[in-house]
Image: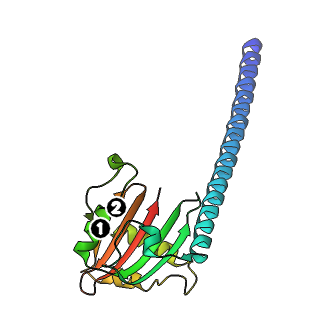
Amino acid sequence: MKKYIAITLILALTLSSCNKVEEKINESIDQATETVKQKAQEQVKETMDKAVNETINSVNNSQDVSFQEVFPNAKTDIISEFKGKKMKFPNGSPAYFLKYKADKTELLQLMAAQPTADEGKSDKEAQKIDGQKFIDQLSFFEKFILEGVLDTNFLNEIKTDKSIEFYRIKRFPNKSTIIVNPQTSVIYQFVEVS
């Protein structure tokens, strides 16, 4: 009987010891996993912060640009009251923010007629879109843009005026988002260059 009690006691102690070892291993794995998660989150946050800061610095250090610089082959006789800014994305790609007056129909035809580096990657005509995603992106960057760099008052206009129309056209390498106020003929155009 003493043998059975001794064996049972040894087995119980061994089982208890194994459970403690397993708990320690699980605890070490959990700590290592949490450390890796924290480091990954810190790295992602650092990368995102750097990209956002570079973009904001580019916007704040933007340069004036003419319509002909952005669209060298375009006739400018349909454009009036032009203002334009050139900035760079963190990847080095240029982008343009333009404001001017023009007839919507003539402008959309002009944009569709722009030369392209790859017709297969280009649209034949501008497509009307819901502008909410674009508004959300601009609203985010608006917080960081220095006063006087860009006229951000138009954001209130495009958020509240239901007559505002949004169009998108890609004539590779350019991709334009065109915001039209049909009542005033004011056009806001954001051009990304791939």
The answer to whether residue 92 of the structure is visible from this angle is: yes
Residue 187 appears in which quarter of the rendering? Answer: bottom left
Identity, as a three-letter code, of the amino acid under mark 2: Gln
Left or right of residue 25, residue 94 in this image: left
Percent x, y for residue 160?
32, 83
List x then y, in percent, for residue 39.
68, 51
Tag 1's secondary structure? helix
Of 192 and 155, nearer the camera is 192
Judge the density around disc 1: few (<14), some (14-19), many (≥20) Cα neighbours within 10 Å.
some
- The x, y position of residue 12, in whole percent, is 71, 25
Q: Position of residue 159 (x, y in %)?
A: 34, 80
In the picture, measured across the screen, residue 75 lies left or right of residue 90, that is left
Q: Nearer the viewer, residue 135 or 2?
A: 135
Q: Mark 1 highlights which residue?
A: 110
Q: Quadrant of residue 45?
A: bottom right
Image colouring: rainbow
Asked if marks 1 and 2 touch (Cβ < 8 Å), the reply is: yes
Q: Amino acid at mark 1?
A: Leu
